[in-house]
Structure formats: C-alpha cells, structure tokens
Image (tube, helix red, strand yellow):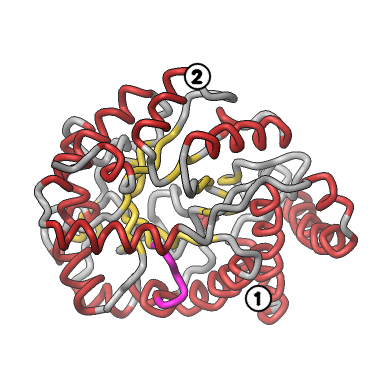
Amino acid sequence: MCTATSAGRHLVVGISSLALTQAEEQFLHRVQPAGVILFSRNIQDPDQVQALIASVRDRIAPTCTIWLDQEGGRVQRLRDPFTRFPSPWQWAVRAERQPERAIELARLAGQVCGMELATMGIGINCAPVLDIREPGANPVIGERAFGDTPQGVVVRAGAWLEGLQAQGVMAVGKHFPGHGAAQADSHQSLPTITGSRAELEQWEWVPFKALLARLPALMTAHLVASGLGEEPATWSRLLLQDILRQEWGYQGLVVSDALEMGALSGPLAERACRAVQAGCDIVLCCTGRLEDNAATLAGVTQAVDAMTGTQKERLDERIIQTLAPYCPAPGDWRALLRQPEYGRAREQLEAVVEENRQADPTESLH
C-alpha cells in the first residue's frame, strides 16, 4: 500500500492563518506534502510570513516548497512593503505604442517579482497566465492576460517568465487548455469552451505550446473543451496524457487548479482521485481547512495505490527532481529593499501603476 508520506508528494495544501496550529504541524510532519500555498489570510507582514515559512520548513524535509499567486494587478498576495505590480494586461496596453518597451517592462516585472519571492523564501509562483483575453468573455481572466492575441501573450508572458526564472523561482503556466474565452468563472461554476481541436491549436494552445519547454509546471483549468470531450480538463486523460504528454512530449509537472472551486462536483476525495488518475502530478487544496486537506490526501492515496510500482517511481522522480531546486531559505528582505538596482527597477514598475491609476481613477491595484 502507498504510505501517507508518498501520497503527500502529490499534494500542495493551504493553511488556516498567520501561524501553524498544532494540528497543522502534526499533519505536515506526518504527510510530508509537496508544498504549502499561501494566501492573504496567511500574510500580515514580511517578518510574520518568514516565520511561518520557517515553521513549515521545520516540519517538511528534506525539501519544502512554498507556493504563491503573484501575477500582478489584482492577483497579488505579497503587497506592502513590496512592489505594486501592474496587471499583465498593462504590458499589452503599452505594446500598442511601445512594443519593445512593453517587453522590457514585462521582463523587469518578472525579475523584481522573483527577487522578492526568493528573498522571502517562496520558490514557486502560480503564474504566468497564458490565457488570451477575449471580448465578451467572463472577466475572471480580463486584465490578468498578457494580451488578446496568441503571439502577444507568447512574447510578453515569455519575457516575464524569463525575468522570474532568472531569480531562481519556478513558474506555473496557467490555465491549460485556455480559459480566456470562457463565459463563466470556474471559481463559481463549470465553464465550457466550444472551439474545435483545430481552432484550439490555432488560438488557445499557441502560448502553451510556444512556452512549453520553458515551463517546469502547467496548471489545469476546470473547464470543458467541448470539442475534446465532456470531462473538465483537470479530469481529462485525453488532454493531460494523450495530448499534453504523448503528443506534445511535455516533461514538466501537471498541477491542478484548486480542487475546491465551484466548477468541479463531488467530494474532495473524489475530485483529487480523478485528477491524479487523469494525469495531474500535484493537486492543490487551498481552503486552509485541515479536514479538506485530509480528504484530498485520501483521494490522492486512493489514486496512487492503484498505480503500479513503476508508475509510482516515475511520478515520484518527476516531482522530486522538478521541485528540488525551488526551496529557498528566507533571506534578508530589508537588505533587498535597500539595494539600488532593485529600487530603480521597482520605481519603473510603480510608475506604470501610477500612470494607470491617473488614466482610470476607479481602478485600484493595491
């Protein structure tokens, strides 16, 4: 039988508050999950965050990855005293008049983001968004997109990715097979994208395929691509194994979006089991509730128990080898804020935020 520890390698969990509870400490020590993902409920100030990360690291060995959503704009967990990042869409706006400058700034945003995350002890960023902004679609993507054309997303998201990875932070591209055209928010309900496979190849899939070799991980979308079946992508063996692994030859990690989202149905254990069976190497449970983490673990354990020994070994090796370089220890964040190079880069990025605020006073990014 699969032990809880080996099943834990397929699991990234949320925690409830600003510090670990005793029950959470015991769970992390017993299960040894692949990582912990932080949200606003876990963040008060840099010292508190680093103390929390240190306590997590003390209980997960030999490696512990800390995950975060730090896209910029409205999806930004770390805030003051760190950089106010423009939304990725601002690089598309800038590209209309200064295409080369837009690429430079996107790369700079990734670089500064990576500097801040690595210094804090956060090794994995659930970004960049590779979805294409579509007119009339649900606004859940909107300004999170790097462009409204495939090539625009490739160029600017690719530059941001380059900047982030230069600082030793792992990127997770999202949301495969493409969320930009969805008419519903998958946090609330199950969307459908209606393009044929040929149409997906020519539009939604272009950024994913172009950047695939540079992405250590891809995150699934909880949506149905009706031209390719009736299952949500997170549960689709066709998308995750036949296309992504076999046809495209992807060697990185496949990571589920948060399993508790409203797009999926059924108990968390069932959701987790189906995701792993379909081809997700890692599943995310982000509620911060210990009972949800335990239920997700049970589903992962069920799926892993059904695998052959060779399958388990290959999966474990893929996960361990991919995540091992992305476990930075918390560093001196105050020293980072004093660095002249960092300060100059930050000023350029925050000037873009201010320009945008003046152009649209109703928009608040921070």
**Quick one: SS at disc 2?**
loop
Picture coordinates of residue 230, whole percent (x, y): 11, 54
Hey, what amino acid is under mark 2?
A: Thr
Residue linked to disc 2? 21
**Quick one: SS at disc 1?**
helix
**For this view, does 344 lie left or right of residue 73?**
right
Report if residue 284 is visible in the image.
yes
Picture coordinates of residue 87, whole percent (x, y): 62, 55
Asked whether 132 or 167 is in front, the reply is 167
> Residue at the spot x=13%, y=41% of the render?
1
Residue linked to disc 1? 103
- The image quarter containing residue 365 is top right
> Residue at the spot x=29%, y=36% of the render?
262
Residue 329 drawn in magenta: no
Disc marking residue 308: none
Magenta span of residues: 213-217
Residue 214 drawn in magenta: yes
> Residue at the spot x=64%, y=70% of the render?
166
Q: Are marks 2 and 1 in contact (CB under 8 Å)?
A: no
- The answer to whether residue 110 is above or below residue 300 is below
